[in-house]
Amino acid sequence: MEYSHEKILYGFQIIGSDKSQVCVKINMSIKKQGEQIIMNEGTAKRVISFSPPDISELEIAEVCEALRSGWITTGPRAKMLECRLAAYIETGETDVDCTCREAIAKHSQKVVCLNSATAAEELNLRILGVGPGDEGIAI
């Protein structure tokens, strides 16, 4: 049977879980022209595989080195990341030497790393020339 509907409503209730599985009760209903028609109700068992992060001693050492350097959101490591990202975007290569002067001069002004999405949005607005008193429409 076909329904011309206004809204499809979904709901679920967690019944139980362990480290690898979650059991939920799923409800779906269609609200048609002011009346509610229950279409399907049931219990479904879903397996959610939890994946531990792949963190090696190399990543841990890099984080420790960054923390010990005193530079968290800016500094030489951020500049190196910007240069490497720009080199990758331009060449598609991951092994471009970004320590030489030529590579730094070629790639260092093409990418900027920021510490938040808010900072990125502010930068976008400044680049577009949007300033105090300007109007915008949020969709």
Image: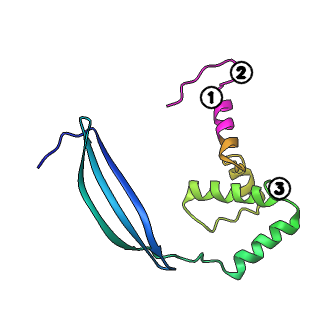
| Residue shown at the point (26%, 46%) measured from the top left | 30
Q: CA distance from mark 2 to mark 1?
A: 13 Å
| Comes first in the chain, label 3 or label 2 | 3
In three-dimensional space, the C-alpha distance between marks 3 and 2, rounded to whole angstroms, equals 30 Å
- Image coordinates for residue 85, horizontal then vertical, percent: 64, 57
Magenta highlight range: 121-139
Query: Tag 3: residue type?
Result: Gly
Q: CA distance from mark 1 to mark 3?
A: 27 Å
Q: Is residue 19 above or below residue 7?
A: below
Please name whichever residue, 95 or 78, is drawn nearer the observer in this view of the structure. 78
The amino acid beneath tag 1 is Leu
The image shows residue 104 at horizontal and vertical percentages of 74, 55
Question: What residue sits right under mark 3 in the picture?
Answer: 75
Q: Secondary structure at mark 2?
A: loop
Q: Check disc 3 and report its element: helix, strand or loop.
A: loop
In this picture, is 8 found above or below 65?
A: above
Q: Quadrant of residue 86?
A: bottom right
Residue 31 vertical position relative to residue 90 in the rendered view, above or below: above
Amino acid type, callout 2 = Pro
Q: Is residue 106 above or below residue 95?
A: above
Name the residue carrying label 1.
128
Left or right of 9 in this view: 22: right
Q: Position of residue 24 (x, y in %)?
A: 39, 68
Instruction: Looking at the image, tell me whether mark 1 or mark 3 is earlier in sequence order.
Output: 3
Residue on which the image places disc 2: 132
